[in-house]
Amino acid sequence: MTPLPLSAFRALAIREGYTALHNRFVQAFALVVWASSTAVAVFTGNDASVPFAVLLLWLYVVPLFALLIGVRTIHEERDEHPFLLSQPVPRVTFIIAKLTTLVGLIAAVLAAALVPVALAAPGGGWMLIFGLGLALALIGVSVGLALGQYAQSAVRGLMGALLLWFVGLVLYDFATLALVQVPFMHDQPALWMGILLLNPLDAVRLAGLMGLEAVPFTVPGAQQWAEPLLNRLDIWVAALTLVWTTVAVEWTRRHLNRYDVQ
Amino acid sequence: MIHCTNLHKSFGSKTVLRGASMDVPPEQGVTALLGPNGAGKTTTLRILAGLVTPDSGTVRINSIDLQTDRAAAQRQLAFLPQDVRFHPAMTPRRVLRFYAQLREIADPDIETALETVRLTDAADRSCEALSGGMRQRLGLALADLMDAPLLLLDEPGLSLDAEWRAYLNKYLCRHVDRGGTVLMATHLLDVWGDLIDATLHCTNGTISAPSESPAHTPAAS
C-alpha cells in the first residue's frame, strides 16, 4: 500500500479544519453539546446521576451530528471535485484527512463540554464517558463520509443520515427485541446479546452504564465463551469502533477510487 | 506527452467514447480538441486528468500510465474545468495557499499570483461571492502556480471578457515557449485560432488524427 503523502495530508487537514469551522452542523453541534451538558450538570440536582445523564445525552447527540457532519463535508466540496481530484494526491488521503480532522474537532468540543460538568460533579468516570463519546464520533463521521460519498445529493445524504441514526437508536432495538420471540433465541441469551452489541449505540450504552456503576455485566444463562466479552465491554467497544470505522473508510475509499467526476 | 489508445466510456446506457485514440507529442504546443456538443471532448479531457476512469483503453501522460499510477501522472498536468468552482468557505488567498501546499510548491508567491489576475481586493472574500470570470482568473492563477508541463483546458475563456482572453492567450504562449504542452477543448476557434498548432476532431465518441495548422510562433505572442 502506498504511504500517505504527509505534506498533502497536512494541507488537506488544515483546509478541512478551516472549512469545518464554517460548517453549520459543526457550529450547531458545539453549541448543543456544550449548552446541554452544562444544563445537565446544573439542573440534575444529584451529583451521582450527572455522568449517567451526560452519557445518555451524548448517545443521542454525538452520533446524529457526527453522521450529519460527515455527509455535509463531502457535499460541500462536490463542485470543486473537477479541480480538487485532478491533483496528484491518492484519493484515500482526502478521506483520512477529513476523518482525522473532524473527529479531532468533535473530540475538542466534547472535552470542552466536559470541563463544566466535571467541575460540577468531580470524579464521575469522565474519562470513560469521553472515550465512549470519541468512539461514537469515529463511527458516526466515518459512516457519514461513506453515506455522503454514495448519496447523489446532499438532501438524500442527510435524509439517509437521519434514517440511519433512527435505526441505530430505536429500530435496531425493536428488531432485536422481536428476535427474543424466536424459540431458538430463548436458549441462546449470549447470542442474542451479541447481536444487540453489534450496534455501536447499544454497546456504548451498556459499556457506559456498567462502567459507571462499576458492576460486571452478566447475562443469565450465558455460555462460558461469552463471558470475556460481557466482562470487558470497554474492549468490545474499542474493537467494534475499529471494525465499523475501517469498514466505512474502506467502503468510501473504494467508491471514491471508482467515482467519475461528471 | 499524451498517448491514449482505444478509449471506451459509457455512463449508464449512454456511450460517450467509442475507441478514441490520440497522440499529442510534447513539442506540439497548443492542440485544440474540436467537435460538436456531446461528442466526448469533456469526457476525454476528464479521463486525461484522472477524473474519469475509462471502461477500456490506455492513457499515458509523459510515459506514465494513468491507470496504474494516477497520482504520478497527475503531477504532470494541470486541469482547468469549464466551470471553475471552489469550496464556499474558502477565500482566493486560502485556495492558492492550499493548492500550493498540496503540490508541495516551495515558497509560493501568493500575493504576486493574486495581483497578476487582479484578485488582490477579493483575496479574502468567500469564493461563493466571486463571479464566474473571477473564478476563472483564480483557476488561471492556480494553473500558473502549479507550473505543470501539460495544461488541459475545457472551454477556456467562456466566462472571460476580451481583456482576460487576451491575457489567457499570452499566458498559453508563454507556457508553450517554456516547453509546455496545451490541450484545449473549445468552440471558440476565432478566439484561439492564431494560437493553435494542431487540431483533433472529436466526433461521435472517436478522435481523428491531428491535422497541421499554421504553426505557433513565439514572436506572434
Image: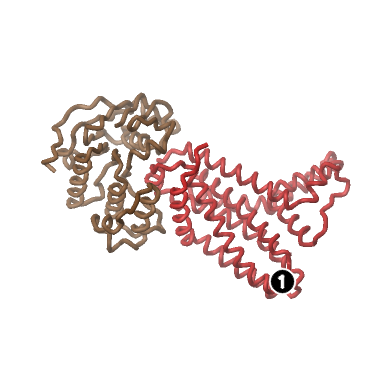
Report x, y in % for residue A161: 58, 51
- Looking at the picture, tell me which residue is in the foreground, A82 or A128: A128
Q: Residue at x 36, y 59 (%)?
A: B91
Question: Is residue A189 shown above or below B39?
Answer: below
Q: Chain A is drawn in which colour?
A: red
Count of numbered labels shown in the rendering: 1
Q: Mark 1 points at which residue?
A: A122
Question: In percent of the image, x 18 and y 33: which residue is there?
Answer: B197
The chain carrying label 1 is A
In this picture the colour scheme is: by chain
> The C terminus of chain A lies in which quarter of the figure?
top left
Q: Furthest residue to the right?
A: A221
Q: Where is residue B161 in the image (x, y as percent from the top left)?
A: 20, 52
A103 in relation to B22, above or below: below
The answer to whether B190 appears left or right of A93 in the picture is left
Number of other residues with Cα within 10 Å of mark 1, as a class: few under 14, some 14 to 19, many 20 or more: some
- Closest to the observer, B81 or A236: A236
Q: Position of residue A213 (x, y in %)?
A: 80, 62
Give the amino acid at mark 1. Answer: Pro
Task: Identify which residue is drawn at 38% across, 48% down.
Answer: B104
- Tell me residue B117's x, y (percent): 24, 55
Looking at the image, the residue that sits furthest to the left is: B219
Q: Which SS class for mark 1?
A: loop
| Residue A52 lies in quadrant | bottom right
* Extreme residue toward the front, this view: B106
Quadrant in the rendering for residue A247: top right
Of the chain colours in the picture, the one used for chain B is brown
Q: Which of A163 and A114 is in front in this view?
A: A114
